Structures are given as C-alpha cells and as structure tokens.
Image (cartoon, rainbow, N blue to C red):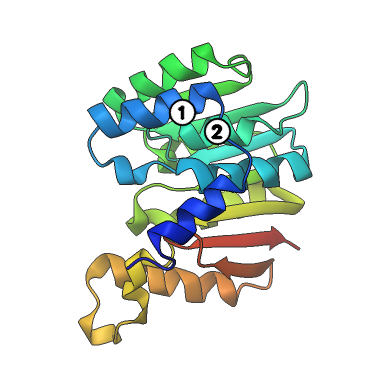
Amino acid sequence: MEFISEALSLYCEHHSEAESVLLQELNRETHLKVLSPRMLSGHLQGRFLSFISQLKQPKYILEIGTYTGYSALCLAEGLQEEGILITIDPNEETNAVAKRYFDKSAHKNKIHLMQGQAGEIIPQLKQDFDIVFIDADKRNYPLYFDLVIDKVKKGGIIIVDNVLWSGKVLQNENEMDTDTKIIHAFNDKVNTDVRVKTLLLPVRDGLLLLIKN
C-alpha cells in the first residue's frame, strides 16, 4: 500500500533538503547491489530523521537495525560535537557496506557499529539515550522497546519504523499474518504505556514517535 502517490512523494522530496553526495552514493549502491533495497530509509525519511536529530541535538543515539547505514548517517547529522551514535545489526554483509560509508563521513568518529543481536547487546549499554531509532526485525519490536525504555532520558525520543506494515494493520485480526499481529499488538502496547506520549505518522510505511515522560 502506498499512502501517497509516487508523484506526490517526489514533490515532497523536491521541496525538502537535498541528500548529500555521500547519501546519494549510498542510496544508489544499495539499490544496485544489496538485497531488499526497500529497507533503506531513503531521501524523505532520512531528512525527517536528520531534522529530528538536529532539533534534539542529542549526545547519545541508539539505532537498532543498521542495514547499509543510511539512517545512521542522517541521524548523526544532529549529534553534539562529542556525541556518539551506536548502531546494532547482526548482518555482516550489510554492515560492511555501512562501515565503508561511515568511514567516508564527517561523522565517522561518532558512529559506533556493533555487530550482533540487539537483544544481547542493549542490556550491556551504559548510556542514557536522547534518541532511539528502531528499524529491525519486527517480531522483536516489543522486546526492543522494553529493553530501551529505561535507557531513554526524560524527554527523549523513540522512533519506530514500519508500524503500518503496508497497511496490513487495518486487516481483521483473524486475517493478519504473524508479523502483522505483532506490529498491531506493539502499536496498542505503546499507545497505552503511561511512560510515553505517542504520535503515529503515515510517512512511508509508518513512523511511530514516542516521547519519554
């Protein structure tokens, strides 16, 4: 399901800040050489993530799900001078692509890529995060939220991608596949959690914004 037409999406991109040359190169390489390029955040969502980061000016960002590094590079644009972005992903192949582009970035010393399972790595992290971006295996969204919520500062932001799941969350529950049921239950779970304020936006495949109370 496309929530807005391709033409309207292109119009929005044209009237938003342009991608950097580095992001353009990464976008192109991902679509030419990497499986499932739809997983890339892309121009409009990338500018949104950068915008939020620049507004927040975070010291610490956590990203769960690196893919080829596009979203991490966008989020890093708002980091404080001494800020750090930790990004976690188990995929050695896509991590190698991400690392190449991180090394070309002005933010290369601020981005720390950790290869492994997020469920094992997150409990070991000692930082209190200003921004968390969750864009990984959907079945573990509830787990990731539970693991990070106490590591987010008061007033911190959690952003969760793919929460509309191509519109499948509108299906009757007995028609939903397992992933859709999990995402739908996750959306209900966080919407009733008194620790956060929620805003679900129909940007690309659905972006859920949470502010820690």
Few, some or many C-alpha atoms within 10 Å of disc 1 (few <14, some 14-19, many ≥20)?
Answer: some
Amino acid under disc 1: Gln
Q: Nearer the viewer, residue 5 or 30?
A: 5
Q: Image check: 132 left or right of 203? A: right
Amino acid under disc 2: Glu
Q: Which residue is mark 1?
A: 24
Q: Quadrant of the N terminus?
A: bottom left
Relative height, residue 184 to residue 22 (above, below)? below
The part of the image, by quadrant, that contains residue 149 is bottom right
The part of the image, by quadrant, that contains residue 90 is top left
- Comes first in the chain, label 2 or label 1: 2
Q: Nearer the viewer, residue 133 or 204?
A: 204
Residue at 36 percent of width and 75 percent of height:
169
Q: Secondary structure at mark 2?
A: loop
Give how far across and how far down residue 212 sits, in percent: 71, 59
Q: Quadrant of the C terminus?
A: bottom right
Residue at 56 percent of width and 16 percent of height:
105
Few, some or many C-alpha atoms within 10 Å of disc 2 (few <14, some 14-19, many ≥20)?
Answer: some
Give how far across and how far down residue 57 sits, in percent: 77, 37
Give how far across and how far down residue 138 sits, in percent: 35, 56
Looking at the image, how many numbered discs can be counted on the residues?
2
Relative height, residue 73 to residue 16 (above, below)? above
Give how far across and how far down residue 10 sits, in percent: 47, 51
Q: Are marks 2 and 1 in contact (CB under 8 Å)?
A: yes
Q: Which residue is mark 2?
A: 19
The part of the image, by quadrant, that contains residue 110 is top right
Q: Image check: 33 left or right of 127? A: left
Q: Is residue 180 visible?
A: yes
What mark, if any, has residue 40 been given in the picture?
A: none
